[in-house]
């Protein structure tokens, strides 16, 4: 009979605790803390994410009902609703954001060779944002309009493994394109974006940084064709052109040649116009890169369905950002566990199993192998596309 650590403790063993303590020390998270440490706070919030707890009272009731298990979970402090609420309210969210970046760096290395549907050696990011609606009376700091509150998660998703490498949390009023001012473009990397990020001055800044972008052209895109390159129209391509901008302002914002590719999608009966500063890749590869951008939409849909980020345990800005970053850390942690244990299950299935076996004393390998359902019956097809790695 197995009498080892409970499942929750086995999952948390994959956390780099030395890095966690450095993140806490960086922002003096342990200052004036006597009993309920930052690690206790993180573990309680991670438990809430893995089991989808509804409220702080829910977290308190569930953990207190298993008081004998708390020590084995790594929780040393006394769990109470008021203590956890106070920790989320006042302890700097940036230490959890930094720790999430540590986990992201680990996951990036583990998934460096993952296939995402396009034969390309370079790193490819999809940039997009999602809006989370909030009650303005409870979250007055997140004003979106006169009667509505909201926050935006601006996310840069690495398509190899669907790892979010950059997240910026803003109020709902920040336009997507402004995130390009915060983002530091990396040379040789592809950034795939929708039309909301078309700003030629910012795209030229990315071009000068030796990074590549792939985006869609807006309807009133003014240009002049310089060259036309042959294409195979049986693949859906209609044209591959080298163009220059001719708009009154845009010609000065982006004075260099740009590549314009037109693709007809027979499945949706849509004509798509792509713009890029990469002239080396085949035109069809550019179209496939943009098609892979849909993974970031699936990522947003998945975390909203399976992590606790649409309803919050606290109403302050610090509490909201703390919860979001711990949710991201949990997501990346499960991705790390999946890769290191060579699990064939999807992240959806792994989370479902964890939610019902969290207190069991079962080896992780057995917990994920002794099931008789298949991912095809438990996860929608779009989630299977994103997470069956």
Image (cartoon, rainbow, N blue to C red):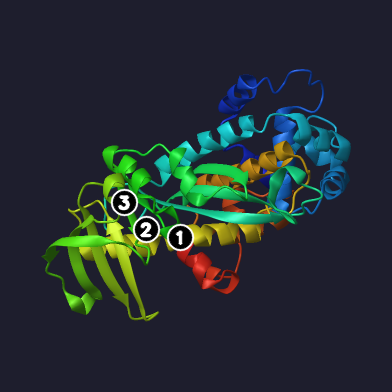
Q: Which x, y percent locates residue 250?
A: 31, 51
Numbered disc in front, either 1 or 3: 3
Dot 1 or dot 3, earlier in sequence: 3
Q: Tell me which corner region of the image, top left, top right, bottom left or bottom right, holds residue 306.
A: bottom right
Label 1, label 3: how many angstroms apart (C-alpha)?
30 Å
Q: Does residue 365 lie above or below 108 as drawn?
A: below
Would you say the residues marked 2 and 1 are in contact, meaning their CB atoms lie under 8 Å apart? yes
Q: Tell me which corner region of the image, top left, top right, bottom left or bottom right, holds residue 289.
A: bottom left
Q: Which x, y percent locates residue 60?
A: 85, 44
Q: Residues within 10 Å of mark 1 (few under 14, many from 20)?
A: many
Q: Nearer the viewer, residue 37 or 262?
A: 262
Q: Residue at x 76, y 36 (%)?
A: 88
Q: Does residue 2 lie above or below 182 as drawn?
A: below
Q: Which mark is residue 295?
A: 1
Where, quadrant-wise, is the C terminus in this rendering?
bottom left
Q: Which x, y percent locates residue 196?
A: 45, 57
Residue at which label 3 appears: 250
Q: Nearer the viewer, residue 60 or 92?
A: 92
Would you say 113 lies left or right of 223 here? right
Q: Secondary structure at mark 2?
A: loop
> In this view of the protein, can residue 355 be seen by the observer?
yes
Find the residue positioned furthest to the front: 248
Q: Which mark is residue 116?
A: 2
Dot 2 or dot 1, earlier in sequence: 2
Q: Which x, y percent locates residue 183?
A: 44, 39
Label 2, label 1: how many angstroms apart (C-alpha)?
9 Å
> In this view of the protein, can residue 344 be seen by the observer?
no
Q: Nearer the viewer, residue 260 or 293?
A: 260
Numbered disc in front, either 2 or 1: 1
């Amino acid at each position: 009979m197995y009498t080892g650590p409970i499942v929750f403790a086995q999952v948390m063993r994959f956390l780099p605790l030395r890095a966690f303590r450095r993140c806490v020390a960086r922002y003096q998270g342990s200052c004036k803390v006597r009993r309920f440490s930052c690690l206790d706070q993180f573990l309680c919030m991670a438990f809430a994410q893995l089991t989808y707890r509804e409220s702080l009272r829910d977290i308190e009731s569930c953990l207190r009902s298993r008081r004998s298990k708390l020590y084995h979970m790594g929780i040393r402090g006394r769990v109470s609703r008021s203590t956890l609420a106070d920790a989320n309210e006042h302890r700097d969210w940036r230490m959890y954001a930094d720790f999430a970046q540590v986990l992201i760096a680990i996951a990036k290395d583990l998934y460096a060779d993952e296939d995402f549907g396009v034969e390309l050696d370079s790193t490819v990011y999809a940039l997009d944002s999602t809006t989370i609606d909030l009650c303005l009376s409870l979250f007055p700091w997140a004003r979106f309009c006169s009667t509505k509150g909201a926050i935006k998660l601006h996310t840069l998703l690495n398509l190899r493994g669907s790892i979010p490498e950059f997240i910026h949390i803003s109020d709902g009023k920040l336009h997507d394109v402004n995130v390009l001012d915060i983002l530091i473009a990396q040379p040789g990397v592809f950034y795939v974006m929708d039309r909301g990020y078309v700003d030629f001055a910012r795209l030229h800044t990315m071009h000068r940084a030796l990074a590549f972008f792939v985006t869609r052209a807006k309807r009133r895109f003014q240009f002049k064709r310089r060259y036309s390159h042959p294409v195979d129209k049986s693949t859906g391509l209609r044209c591959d052109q080298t163009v220059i901008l001719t708009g009154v302002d845009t010609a000065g914002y982006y004075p260099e040649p740009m590549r314009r590719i037109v693709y007809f999608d027979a499945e949706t009966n849509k004509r798509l116009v792509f713009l890029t500063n990469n002239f080396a890749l085949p035109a069809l590869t550019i179209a496939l890169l943009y098609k892979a951008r849909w993974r970031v939409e699936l990522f947003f849909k998945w975390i909203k369905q399976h992590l606790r980020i649409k309803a919050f345990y606290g109403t302050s800005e610090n509490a909201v950002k703390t919860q979001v970053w711990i949710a991201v850390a949990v997501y990346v942690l499960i991705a790390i566990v999946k890769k290191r244990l060579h699990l064939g299950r999807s992240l959806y299935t792994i989370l479902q199993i964890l939610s019902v076996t969290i207190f069991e004393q079962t080896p992780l390998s057995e917990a994920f192998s002794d099931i008789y359902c298949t991912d095809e019956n438990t996860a929608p097809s779009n989630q299977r596309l994103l997470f069956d790695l």
